């Protein structure tokens, strides 16, 4: 038998609909992963609706859950996946947990979806509190191995607007410089060669081909994907 591969998924939960942990858990299980979930929020529905109700987990509550795992010695993971949250202290606690888990398992991969907002009709808007941005930029992204922002979130993290594919490449370079080996801009406003029925996503993976004592020599692979809606 292949060794068990376990994921700690810290994302949202909704009663109606499929986002966050409710969307991620089953596909990961189908692919053979064991998934332990922490619900960063528990909402009636996602916040794109006119109304939503529910609870937001804070850092003390997250710490208590994680301490329970530690006491039972079941806090060893191969992957950590994080998504939507609304609390800055919670997000800072996530960083502490990821760092501790990486000390236990140096091969652990942290996948961060920095869920902050999106664009509608060309205008960007945040749907989480604005004080989450500096926590993502300064604390979360530097410890992530893979990040998956949309175009608006990539622009927020770097302070750089994307108008062309060249701009997108430069933004991904900036995101790599913050720490992540892999950057995927999951959606963009860039014009697809095949027309408006396609959505452009961009991915970049940093590869260390040689490494000096103080300065790594890096190359970048870029893939541009056209995705039908």
Image (tube, grey):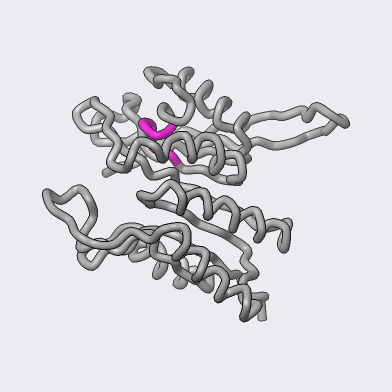
Q: Nearer the viewer, residue 18 or 75?
A: 75
- Tell me residue 221's x, y (percent): 61, 33
Q: Nearer the viewer, residue 50 or 3?
A: 50
The residue positioned 46% from the left and 19% from the top of the image is 167
The reply to whether residue 225 is visible in this rendering is no
- Tell me residue 90's x, y (percent): 45, 53
The residue positioned 71% from the left and 61% from the top of the image is 105
- Tell me residue 110's x, y (percent): 58, 52
The residue positioned 34% from the left and 65% from the top of the image is 22
Range of the magenta residues?
A: 149-154
The reply to whether residue 11 is visible in this rendering is yes
Compared with residue 2, is residue 117 higher up or lower down, i.e. above or below?
above
Q: Nearer the viewer, residue 114 or 129?
A: 129
Which quarter of the figure is the C terminus placed in?
top left
- Tell me residue 170's x, y (percent): 53, 21
Q: Residue furthest front?
A: 60
């Amino acid at each position: 038998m292949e060794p068990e591969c376990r994921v700690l998924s810290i994302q949202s939960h909704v009663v109606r609909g499929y986002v966050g942990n409710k969307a991620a858990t089953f596909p990961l299980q189908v692919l053979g992963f064991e998934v332990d979930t922490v619900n960063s929020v528990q909402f009636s529905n996602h916040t794109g609706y006119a109304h939503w109700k529910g609870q937001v987990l804070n850092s003390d509550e997250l710490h208590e859950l994680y301490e329970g795992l530690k006491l039972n010695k079941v806090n060893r993971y191969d992957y950590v996946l994080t998504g939507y949250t609304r609390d800055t202290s919670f997000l800072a606690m996530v960083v502490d947990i990821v760092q501790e888990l990486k000390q236990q398992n140096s091969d652990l991969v942290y996948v961060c979806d920095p869920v902050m907002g999106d664009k509608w009709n060309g205008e960007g808007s945040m749907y989480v509190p604005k004080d989450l941005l500096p926590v993502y930029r300064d604390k979360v992204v530097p410890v992530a191995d893979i990040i998956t922002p949309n175009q608006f979130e990539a622009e927020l993290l770097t302070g750089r607007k994307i108008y062309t594919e060249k701009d997108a490449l430069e933004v991904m370079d900036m995101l790599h410089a913050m720490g992540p080996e892999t950057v995927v801009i999951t959606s963009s406003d860039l014009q697809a060669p095949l027309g408006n029925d396609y959505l452009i996503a961009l991915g970049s993976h940093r590869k260390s081909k040689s490494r000096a004592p103080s300065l790594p020599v890096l190359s970048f692979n870029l893939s541009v994907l056209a995705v039908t809606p």
